[in-house]
Image (spheres, rainbow, N blue to C red):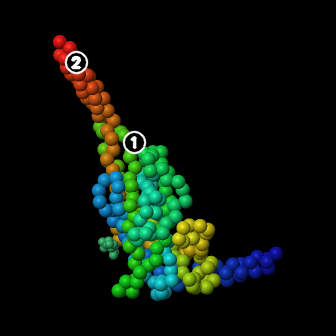
Amino acid sequence: MRHVGLCLLAVVALYIPHCFTSTCPLVLKTNAQVERRLLNEGFHRDLETSVFLSSPENLKSCIVLIKDVYPPGSYVDPNQLKFFKPFGGPDFYIPQMINVETPEHFSPRILAYYFVRPQPMDDGRWLINMTVPIHFRYHRARSGTSYPLEVGVRLPHPAILLQCEDVGGDACRALTQLEPCPPTGNDQCEWLSIHTFSTSEAVMGIIPVGNTDLLDTVLMTTTCVTAGATLLILASLRKKKT
Ligand SMILES: *[C@@H]1O[C@H](CO)[C@@H](O)[C@H](O)[C@H]1NC(C)=O
């Protein structure tokens, strides 16, 4: 029994360092700097994502997967993305139906996959520069005396994964995870998750929220105006008759 225990221990001791000292340079020595900008104003904006990849490997054959999770206060419109594809928009896959009408409190988070080829930069890094139209959803109105009348919808940075023609042997293959295949998301492909960092905070859309305190005033005004108009019409009708 003791022998078996010792033997197991030896196997574990031999095996564990092996697991952690993987020799997949694509994963170990590649990193992705992700920066974002939210352009324009209001509910309909453009989200620019720049990814700078540093790697000792040649990434020419690689496709980058940008995996985004948008919070319930925002959405991307698959029809709009489809429309932009012939004009340089990215290949994408959005696995769920998107309702572009629902307010924030009736909406789910949205998962979006973008497939993009990196371009070589002068400094040896590889660049992805992608802009997609993004929309913010209406938020439930609330009391302006108790709450601020603006909300921030934070768009977290995406995850970055790589798929290259020569994955770099078994060491790399062991590290892959399954995600949708380019360009349309049909089937599952093996992707390598890349370490990411950023020099900027996640971008945030500031959205105005309706004020329920004003509801009484709005109703009063509407009623008064309607009543006043009715009276005017009645008065003019009477005038005509006489
Ligand atoms: C990405 O493209 C936009 C629009 O063409 C440009 O203004 C921006 O500087 C580019 N970003 C990078 C990092 O090259």
Rendered position, 233 above or below 150: above
Classify the position of the N terminus by image quarter: bottom right
Apparent side of residue 164 relative to residue 149 in the rendered image (left or right): right
Q: Nearer the viewer, residue 26 or 6?
A: 26
**Residue 192 at x, y = what percent?**
55, 75
Residue 46 seen in render: yes
Which residue in the rendered view is the most extreme toward the front? Answer: 241
Of label 2 and label 1, which has the lower sequence position? Answer: 1
Amino acid at dot 2:
Leu
As drawn, the label of residue 237 is 2
Amino acid at dot 1:
Arg
Apparent side of residue 204 relative to residue 28 in the rendered image (left or right): left
**Residue 128 at x, y = what percent?**
41, 75
Helix, strand or loop at label 1? It is loop
Q: Nearer the viewer, residue 55 or 16?
A: 55
Cβ–Cβ below 8 Å for labels 2 and 1?
Answer: no
Helix, strand or loop at label 2? It is helix
Rendered position, 106 above or below 76: above
Rendered position, 121 above or below 111: below
Identify the residue at image location x=53%, y=71%: 183
**Other-residue count near label 2 (Cα within 10 Å), few / some / many at <14 / 14–19 / ≥20:** few
Identify the residue at image location x=56%, y=83%: 165
As drawn, the label of residue 140 is 1
User: Which quadrant of the figure has residue 24?
Assistant: bottom right
Residue 159 seen in render: no
User: Which quadrant of the figure has residue 181?
Assistant: bottom right
Classify the position of the C terminus by image quarter: top left
Determine the CA span between mark 2 and mark 1. Answer: 43 Å
Apparent side of residue 235 relative to residue 208 in the rendered image (left or right): left
Ligand 1 location (quadrant): bottom left
